[in-house]
Amino acid sequence: MFNGDLSFCEIGSGAIDKVKILMNKNVKFYFPIDISFKFIKKASKKLKKKYPKLKIKPIYADYNKPFKIQNYKKTTKIFFFLGSSIGNFHPGEDIKFLKNLAKCIDKKSFVFVGVDLVKKANIIEKAYNDKAGYTAKFSLNLINVINRNFKCGLNINNFYYRGVYNRKLRSIQGFLISKCDQSFKIDFKKFILKKDEKIQVEVSNKFTIKSFTKLAKKANFKTHSFWTDKLNFFAIFLLKR
Ligand SMILES: C[S@@+](CC[C@H](N)C(=O)[O-])C[C@H]1O[C@@H](n2cnc3c(N)ncnc32)[C@H](O)[C@@H]1O
């Protein structure tokens, strides 16, 4: 499908673990686009060690705002927005993100988007309330981050995590729930949390093939192809302008 030299452009590249699998000799340039300078720097350095000939051009940017990628040596640009990050936007933000992306790319470029599909509520809830407690640990770590940044002395043991699937919104909502009445201060402002009060810390929207195709179309993209796994749990869409 892709002939000649390629440029891989990864949106929200993070640790560059996924695109690394797809690297081949036709990929001449790699553009990681991420808001975290620390992440881009560290991950790019590691990638360069593995692929010394690959030209890595980190782009430190907010992917919700216009960004520009140079067309080095007329390569075909392939963009990746992997994982299920497209589901992590609040209502209306996903279309804004895609519309901005459509403006940032040319007609010859391709965009791969990972999409988590709607499935039975119990399957989704099981994944977000995993037995090993990874999601809970990840979400509760926000308490450590808040403490580190605002020195407000919250006790992580006074919270627990729950992921709840909202069928109407087709969305997982992750909550930190207060185990007791408690209060804390941020910048001298006092916050009171009652027992069982929830703080929403995550949104993960699920799509159907139809709903994502519609969203992409509204954002001025055409669906070139899509693939799903055997169970129809997850899809990869290939979009063109
Ligand atoms: C969940 S990680 C995904 C990493 C990788 N794409 C993957 O699928 O494994 C999300 C990445 O997006 C970056 N990110 C989040 N919001 C962003 C924004 N507005 N602009 C650019 N990067 C962003 C984060 O810094 C993080 O590295």
Image: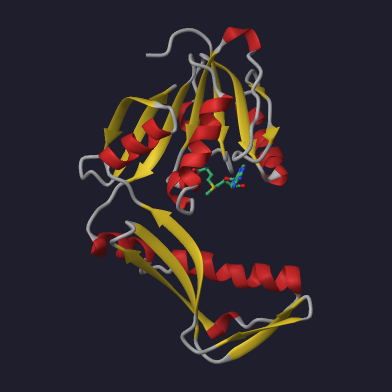
Instruction: Name the residue furthest right.
Output: 188
How many numbered callouts? 0
Q: Quadrant of residue 211?
A: top left
Seen in the image, is 57 located left or right of residue 9? right
| Ligand 1: image quarter | top right
Q: Quadrant of the C terminus?
A: top left
Q: Quadrant of residue 212?
A: top left
Say which of 208 and 214 sits in front: 214
**Residue 231 x, y percent position in the rendering:** 21, 45
Say which of 238 and 107 sits in front: 107
Residue shown at 43% from the left, 69% from the top: 133
State whether residue 117 is above or below residue 29. below
**Residue 45 x, y percent position in the rendering:** 69, 34
Seen in the image, is 189 located left or right of residue 222? right
Residue shown at 26% from the left, 60% from the top: 123
Seen in the image, is 226 located left or right of residue 180? left
Visual colour scheme: secondary structure
**Residue 227 x, y percent position in the rendering:** 28, 32
Residue shown at 41% from the left, 64% from the top: 173
Say which of 21 and 240 sits in front: 240
Q: Quadrant of the N terminus?
A: top left
Say which of 206 and 92 sits in front: 92
Instruction: Name the residue furthest bottom.
Output: 181
State whether residue 115 is above or below residue 47. below
